[in-house]
Image (cartoon, rainbow, N blue to C red):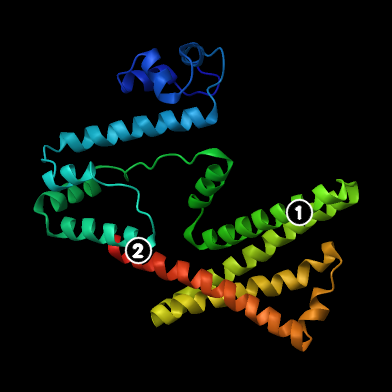
Amino acid sequence: MQANHFDVRAARERLELGTEALAAELQVTEGEVRAWESGAIRIPRNARRALEYRVAHAEWSAGMAASGLPECEWLKSERAKLVLPRGTEEMIRLAGTVRAHMWACEVCTARERWAKEHLPPFPLPPAKGAVGTALGAIQRLPAWARPAAWGGLAMAAMTAARALLMLATTGWRARDVLEAAGAVLLAAAAGAAGGLVYTLTRPATRRLGTAGDYLSGILASTAFVGAAVAVLPFVTRTPMLDEAVRPAGAIIFALTALLFGLIVGKMTHDGERLKKATE
């Protein structure tokens, strides 16, 4: 029995691979694969997730093959031509082209209908690295909690980068390290506040179309900037609230919220377009 109750041997055999072939796929040594199978060492989490994905993909493909439905020759030929899109517009165009074909193609609609009735959702590849792990965890959250998590993660990352730069110049004094850690946590809380406002207001703003997409971003950004002004002074000892109520500070506050809001709004707008193209 594996130390972590994951049967590597069974997974490998399900994929019809030898130990050498599996080692090559996972970019490890054959000795490591044998040690996982014997239970001598625990399979690392990233390798386990990669193996679980391969098995799930193989089972999904086998299930689809069992349907007896033919593959779409257009998709089969286009698949070899597809390259990673260079931008949002290209991604939307590509998704729209594929989806338009699938709507009109009897073979594609029959396969999609059969898959929805008989198979689990198509498996997605596991996220890679620390950032990928965090993003994967966010995707597993309920839909209403994801904007808050995205906002918290983004602001924590930005604040951490600035904090590391500051600490490199101050000599990593204990007090500065604690203040930097507190700033990162409070920035994450401010980002989460902006995301929560996005969640609460999005159902209403979505009905306004494009204007609502940008309004969602502005409202979320205003909530974030307001939360930052309120909480960061407790760590940074910067009188941000005093500055924000002055005319010049209020203008800077408004422009900052507007700028970030337009960026978030553009992301929201592009996301809605991509969603419509793939539905």
Q: Depth check: give the residue in front, 242 or 147.
A: 242
Q: Tell me which amino acid carries mark 2.
A: Glu
108 is higher (above) or lower (below) than 87: above
Say whether marks 2 and 1 touch (CB < 8 Å): no
Pointer 2 local density, CA inside 10 Å: few below 14, some 14–19, many at least 20:
few
Left/right placement of residue 225 relative to residue 81 reads right
Query: Which residue is found at the position 38% from the left and 55% from the top?
Result: 86
Quadrant of the drawing holding the C terminus:
bottom left
Residue 222 visible in this rendered orientation of the protein: no
**Callout 2: SS:** helix
Left/right placement of residue 177 relative to residue 94 reads right
Quarter holding residue 222: bottom right
Counting residues from the N terminus, which is met first, the one under dot 2 or under dot 1? Answer: 2
Q: Where is residue 107 in the image (x, y as percent from the top left)?
A: 11, 49
Query: Which residue is found at the position 61% from the left and 55% from the top?
Result: 153
Q: Tell me how many marks there are.
A: 2
170 is higher (above) or lower (below) than 41: below
128 is higher (above) or lower (below) than 203: above
Q: Tell me which amino acid carries mark 1.
A: Ala
Left/right placement of residue 20 relative to residue 109 reads right
> Any mark on residue 89, and which?
2
Quarter holding residue 8: top left
Residue 209 visible in this rendered orientation of the protein: yes
Pointer 1 local density, CA inside 10 Å: few below 14, some 14–19, many at least 20:
some
Q: Where is residue 16 in the image (x, y as percent from the top left)?
A: 30, 19
Q: How far apart are marks 2 and 1 (CA)?
A: 35 Å
Left/right placement of residue 277 relative to residue 248 reads left
Q: Residue furthest bottom?
A: 247
Q: Where is residue 110 in the image (x, y as percent from the top left)?
A: 13, 50
Query: Which residue is found at the position 70% from the left and 71% from the top?
Result: 227
- The residue that disc 1 covers is 163
> Any mark on residue 95, and which?
none
